[in-house]
Image (cartoon, coloured by chain):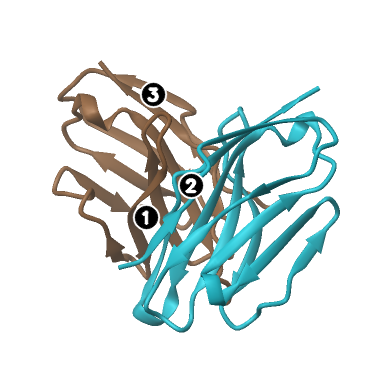
C-alpha cells in the first residue's frame, strides 16, 4: 500500500540554524500539507501546497518557514532560523485530487537546542 | 470559526470493555468532513474514518463504530471489546471544503489506555 515517507525521523539542531524536513507524498496525490505537533499537544496545520504554490497557510507559518517541491517526488519544509519553540513533531500529509482524506507520514521529530 | 472539542483528555478501561470517545464540532458550513485519526505510542497518525456532512448513517468497521449526529454536532467513536492494542491518542478533525479550507482542524485528542 502506498504511503507518505518522511526523512529524517529525528533531527537535532542548534538554535538559529536552518533545517530542511523532507517528505515524499503518495505518488498520485497532488495536494500536500505540513502540520506540527508540539509534545503532548494537538496537531496544528501549517501550510498546504498545490500546483507549485501555497494554497492555505496558518498564522504559525511565518516568514521563517518556506515550502518547496524541488522535483517530481519530494516536498520540503524549510525553517530558516530555528527557535527553541520550533521543537515539535512535523507531519507531512498528502491527498488525491478526488478525495478529502489526508494520509500522514510518520513524522520528523525536530529538537532545537 | 471552525472548532473541534474532545472534552475527554484521558480514558482508562480494562480490556474487553466498550469505550466511547466524544467529539463535538462547530462550523458554519453546510458541507464539511469529519475524521478520526489514531496516534499509537510510535507517533504516526493513522486515518480511521471520514464522514461527510450529508451522510448521517452510522458506520461499523469490525470493533469500531461511529455515531454522527448533526442535531448535536457530534461525531462519537465507540470501540467495542477494547484491546490493549487500542491504546493510543485518538484525534477528531474537521475540514470545510466549501470555504476552501481543506486543512484539518484537530481536536486536542483523547488518550485511551486499555489495561490488560
Identify the element where label 2 is drawn: loop
Chain with colour cyan in the figure: B
Q: How far apart, in angstroms, are the residues tagged by discs 3 and 1?
A: 20 Å
Q: Which of marks 1 and 2 is in front?
A: 2
Q: Is mark 3 on a helix, strand or loop?
A: strand
Image point (54%, 59%), residue name = A102
Residue assigned mark 1: A69
Residue at the location (79% across, 44% down)?
B18
Q: Answer left or right for B27 relative to A24.
A: left
**What is the spatial separation of the Cα atoms under label 3 and label 2, in whole angstroms?**
33 Å
Q: Which chain is brown?
A: A
Question: Depth check: B47 or B68 in front?
Answer: B68
Residue that badge 3 annotates: A11
**Residue B42 x %, y %:** 61, 28
Judging by the rendered image, the residue that carries numbered circle 2 is B7
Residue B85 in picture, x, y percent from top left: 76, 32
Q: In this view, does B73 lie above or below A57?
A: below
Residue B71 in view in this figure: yes
Tell me whether marks 3 and 2 sit on the same chain: no
Secondary structure of residue under mark 1: loop
Q: Is residue A54 left or right of residue A101?
A: left
Which residue is drawn at the image coordinates 16% and 49% (left, top)?
A62
The subunit carrying tag 2 is: B
Q: Where is residue A100 in the image (x, y as percent from the top left)?
A: 54, 70
Q: How crowded is mark 1: few (under 14 residues within 10 Å), some or many (20 or more)?
A: some
Amino acid at each position: 500500500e502506498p504511503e507518505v515517507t518522511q526523512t529524517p525521523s529525528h533531527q537535532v539542531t542548534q538554535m538559529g540554524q536552518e533545517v530542511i524536513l523532507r517528505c515524499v507524498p503518495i505518488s498520485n496525490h497532488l495536494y500536500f500539507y505540513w502540520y506540527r505537533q508540539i509534545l503532548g499537544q494537538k496537531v496544528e496545520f501549517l501550510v498546504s501546497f498545490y500546483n507549485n504554490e501555497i494554497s492555505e497557510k496558518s498564522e504559525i507559518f511565518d516568514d521563517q518557514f518556506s515550502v518547496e517541491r524541488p522535483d517530481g517526488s519530494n516536498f520540503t519544509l524549510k525553517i530558516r532560523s530555528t527557535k527553541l519553540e520550533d521543537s515539535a513533531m512535523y507531519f507531512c500529509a498528502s491527498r488525491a485530487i478526488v478525495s478529502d482524506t489526508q494520509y500522514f507520514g510518520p513524522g520528523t521529530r525536530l529538537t532545537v537546542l | 470559526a471552525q472548532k473541534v472539542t474532545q472534552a475527554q483528555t484521558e480514558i482508562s478501561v480494562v480490556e474487553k470493555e466498550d469505550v466511547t470517545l466524544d467529539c463535538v464540532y462547530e462550523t458554519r458550513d453546510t458541507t464539511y468532513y469529519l475524521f478520526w485519526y489514531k496516534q499509537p505510542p510510535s507517533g504516526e497518525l493513522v486515518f480511521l474514518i471520514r464522514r461527510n456532512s450529508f451522510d448521517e448513517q452510522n458506520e461499523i468497521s469490525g470493533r469500531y463504530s461511529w455515531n454522527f449526529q448533526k442535531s448535536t454536532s457530534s461525531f462519537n467513536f465507540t470501540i467495542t471489546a477494547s484491546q490493549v492494542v487500542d491504546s493510543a491518542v485518538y484525534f477528531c478533525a474537521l475540514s470545510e471544503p466549501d470555504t476552501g479550507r481543506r486543512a484539518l482542524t484537530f481536536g486536542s485528542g483523547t488518550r485511551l489506555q486499555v489495561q490488560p
